[in-house]
Amino acid sequence: MRCVVRGGRKGRLTNAMRGDQTPRSVWVPTADARIHCEIHGDAPGTPIVMIHGLGGNVRSWDGIPAALARTRRVAVVDLRGCGRSERGSAPITLPTLADDVAAVIAHLGAGRCHLIGHSLGGVVAQDLLVRHGRSCGAAVLVSTSSKVGAQAAEGWRRLADVVEQRGVVGEGGSARAFSDAFAAQHPELVEEQGRISASADAKVYAAQARAASSYDYSEALTSVENPVLVMQGLADRMTSPGGSVLLSRAIPNSELELIEGVGHNLHVEMGERFVDVVLEFLTRHDAR
């Protein structure tokens, strides 16, 4: 395991980096639902599949997909019941969510796809690596962990109960997902992420929270052969940085980036630097 500690922000994404191309929407059928994803770009090379976190949708990535699409095709997934994806009849579990993403990978027809997963999306990516590893290239796991402890599990279950009773408003996308400095400097971005969470279906949000309350991939990840980059903000108040260390230690071919001064929504805070780090890592592993 290689570990690097970096400085945080290099700068917000410019309009030029975000691009002016309108992504195209695709619905991928599964056994019980149609999964929506946005396709950005058509550059050759190994495509990227991006998986958002709890209560998010394709908009949670704040322009990152368009910036990545300058060099390759990028598919941004709405997890089932989120954004424009159908809820379906299957229970919302980590394997179900991972199987949905595997269907998207197969639909893209590229053989293998690189993965980027944030928070809960990073856990879904771990399930993909464990059970669908041959369909995956390299993976970037952001603000996530390989297992959930007893205290955190109780917190997730309590959150699910609260959301079912009161709705999602105020439960996600708050300033807690950012470092104090960033939240003070960019209240409009904090508010936008809050609006995304508030738009989530409460039952889906609660089901995702319960799925996040019970998992442990630590042992299974020891057999993963894919190269993995773990990225963790040292100002993250929602996922302990210690969890990222345990995650990276479990994966044989892993690298760990600890980012100073950024919080849970690391990709939003880092902006251009996030794009640079991810593209450098994925480009190194394209040939594999």
Image (tube, rainbow, N blue to C red):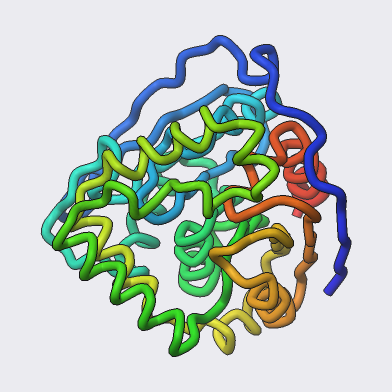
Left or right side of 247 for 288: right
Q: Nearer the viewer, residue 76 or 259?
A: 259
Residue 78: x and y, percent? 35, 43
> From the image, which quarter does the C terminus lie in?
bottom right
Q: In the displayed structure, would residue 203 be above or below residue 243?
A: above
Residue farthest along the left direction in this orientation: 89
Left or right side of 241 for 210: left
> From the image, which quarter does the N terminus lie in?
bottom right
Identify the image quadrant of residue 230. bottom right
Q: Nearer the viewer, residue 131 or 193?
A: 193
Left or right side of 97 for 275: right
Task: Count the marks.
Answer: 0
Is any atom of residue 231 visible in this view? no
Say which residue appears at 64% left-offset and 14% top-offset.
Answer: 15
Say which residue appears at 15% left-offset and 53% top-offset.
Answer: 88
Q: Nearer the viewer, residue 107 or 265?
A: 265
Residue 84: x and y, percent? 26, 35
Q: In the displayed structure, would residue 91 be above or below residue 220?
A: above
Residue 113: x and y, percent? 57, 48
Is any atom of residue 34 visible in this view? yes
Q: In the displayed structure, would residue 106 be above or below residue 207?
A: above
Say which residue appears at 40% left-offset and 81% top-offset.
Answer: 153
Residue 8: x and y, percent? 80, 46
Left or right side of 50 for 266: right
